[in-house]
Each structure stands twice: as C-alpha cells, then as structure tokens.
Image (cartoon, rainbow, N blue to C red):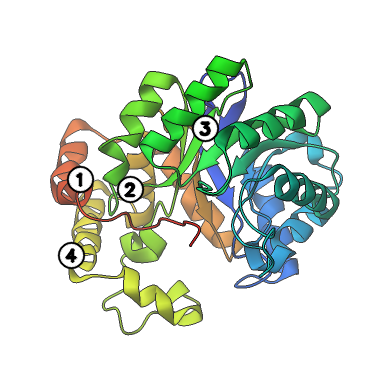
Amino acid sequence: MDYKRLGRSGLEVSALGLGTNSFGSRADARTSEQIIHAALDRGINFLDTANIYSDTASESIIGQAIQNRRDQVILATKAGLPTGKGPNEQGSSRRHLMLELEKSLKRLRTDYVDLYQIHTFDPNTPLEETLRVLDDMIRSGKVRYIGASNYAAWELMKALGISDHLGLNRFVSMQTSYSLADRTPEREVIPLCIDQGLGIIPYFPLAGGILTGKYTSAKEGPSGSRLEKNPSFAQRISEDSLALGREVGRIAAEAGCSASSLSLAWLMEQPVVSSVIVGATRVEQVEDNLKSVELALDSTTMAQLDGASRAFRNGEPFGYFRLS
C-alpha cells in the first residue's frame, strides 16, 4: 500500500481509502465488518464516514468493527448536513457541531476522531464561530485534524484566511466529488488546494459506478447497483457519462486492467490527491479496488484518459451536497 501525507499535515493516509456510506443500508452489518477487516488487513488505514450515513448505522458498525484495531485506523467522520427537522439539527453552529461530535464518538466507540470534516458550507453561521469550535475540539483532544467538504473555492479560501488571521487550526483537507466524469474541481478548488497545501479527498471516484461500465442506460442497473437501490440516481446518469464509461472500458482493455482500477489509478496520479475513498458492498470489491494502487499508468494512457474526459471539466459537479 502507498501512503501519502494529508495536505501539509504530518498524517499519513493510504492512497486508497474506504468509503462507508453503504454500511447498514446496501451492505448489512456482518458484511460491512468483513469489508472493514479485509481493508485493514491489506493496508488501507483511512476510513471515511459521516453522522448521517445509513441513518447513523455506518458509524455504529465501524465502532463495533474497530474496537480492537483502533490504532490501525485513521478515522474520519463529518457533520453539518441535516440530522432532523429541527431548527438546530443542521449546519456548522457551535451547538450543533459539539452535540454531533459527542454522538459520533459514542457510536464509533472512541474518544477521538482523526479527521473531523464539515460536510458542507453553512451560510447561516459565521465562519469564525465554526472555526473556533473546531479549534476547541482539537485543543480538547477529541479531534486531531479538521477538513472541509463540498465548499466552493471562495468559501474554502475565506475559511483559511480567518484561521490564519486568528491563529486557529486550519483545514488540512478538502473532500469533493472528483473523477474522470467530474473534473470540475480542476477549475478552482484544486489550484487553491495546491497553493494552500490542502489534501484532496475525492468522493464519487467511479461516478457512482458509471466508470465501471456496468450501466448501459439510466433506466436500469445490475442487481445490487446504486441505481437499483436508489432510483433517483438516474438523474446523475447522462448519455455523455455513459459514453465516457464505454471509452474508459476500451482504454482499460488495451491497458490490461479493469475500468474501475484504471479510473482510480488516474485519480491517484492527480496533484494533491491524498486518498481516494471508494465504497464497497462486498469484500471482493475491496480486492479489485486494491489493484489500482499497483497500476502504473504510462503517458499514452494518461493522455487518452485526459482527452476522453476533458469536457467534464465544465458543467455541473457530479456530486455537490448543500444546505437548502
């Protein structure tokens, strides 16, 4: 396994991380625990979850699975998206974040998280309030590092500027939708992160499965697919993305690897990408995803992938979660 620093921090994370939003929903508890142990056994040390994944079940399953392996895990979770319908059950206020951190720690059966991330920008809470409570969490020992997710470039830069001005701990990472089917971060977010020393943590690295080649239309997907479990996912599938999936499959065949391994390896070659988080609903998927770490892409293959996906730098992000 390759390990990379998370931004300018001293934290080393596996180049391939484990996304866990399916744990407790598309993958039952027993299967999820098997996936976690298989990932840890193969050198994956970065586990990413959130307080809302599978209605909190993801955190609870992880907490059970890593009880005796906590020191092997770089554990990341998030808060900020709605947890209920109440006026204080979302956002990045001091009240909400402190309450949600305590709940997460209880479910995860740990006294600290390695990376605590703000799930999305909160336009209703002053950034200074958010950044001060995150700094307090670090000083308390309950959080080691902090990160952002789903921030626009200007929002992220404003947060970094406030932290620097006030002498607060600053974000070390940015989690964003990024893949061959979504290169929109390359316009502003990635140049900012290069300049400011933040590590990029891509989510939706396979565009929900589109880049694996398993979808032939937006109307139906294979058994167990995201589309089968969540029909609204069809809104994210376009003819252009399906065509890209086919082209990635063709390039992968020439390179002698799977389309998913090729897509993940391409991401690992991108500037400031620290860890590519990939979900799994079967242990076999973890094994297949691990092949991407050993895959060396030559300049011809990189140029082919760049040409096939260049148009996806424009338009709307594949994934972008915001408070309404």
Residue in the image at 48% along x and 32% along y: 274
Residue in the image at 50% along x and 30% along y: 159
User: Which sits earlier in the primary sequence, circle 3 or circle 1?
Assistant: 3
Q: Do the residues labelled 2 and 1 touch (CB within 8 Å)?
A: yes
Label 4 – label 3 distance at C-alpha: 30 Å
Question: At which x and y percent is residue 168?
Answer: 63, 20
Give the class, few, some or many, for how many residues have Cα within 10 Å of label 2's Cα (few <14, many ≥20). Answer: many
Disc ID at residue 240: 4
Can you tell which of label 4 and label 3 is closer to the viewer?
3
User: Under tag 3, what secondary structure?
Assistant: strand
In the picture of the structure, the residue carrying the numbered disc 1 is: 305
In the picture of the structure, the residue carrying the numbered disc 2 is: 262
Q: Which amino acid does label 1 sit on?
A: Leu
Disc ID at residue 173: 3
Give the class, few, some or many, for how many residues have Cα within 10 Å of label 4's Cα (few <14, many ≥20). Answer: few
State which quadrant residue 42 falls in: top right
User: Which sits earlier in the primary sequence, circle 4 or circle 2?
Assistant: 4
Q: Which amino acid does label 3 sit on?
A: Ser
Q: Which amino acid does label 4 sit on?
A: Asp
Judge from the rendering whether residue 20 lies leftward or rightward of residue 258; answer left or right: right
Label 3 – label 1 distance at C-alpha: 26 Å
User: Which sits earlier in the primary sequence, circle 4 or circle 3?
Assistant: 3
Give the class, few, some or many, for how many residues have Cα within 10 Å of label 1's Cα (few <14, many ≥20). Answer: many
Can you tell which of label 2 and label 1 is closer to the viewer?
1
Q: Which residue lies furthest to the bottom in this view?
A: 219
Q: What residue type is labelled 2?
A: Leu
Q: Do the residues labelled 3 and 2 touch (CB within 8 Å)?
A: no
Residue in the image at 66% along x and 57% along y: 35
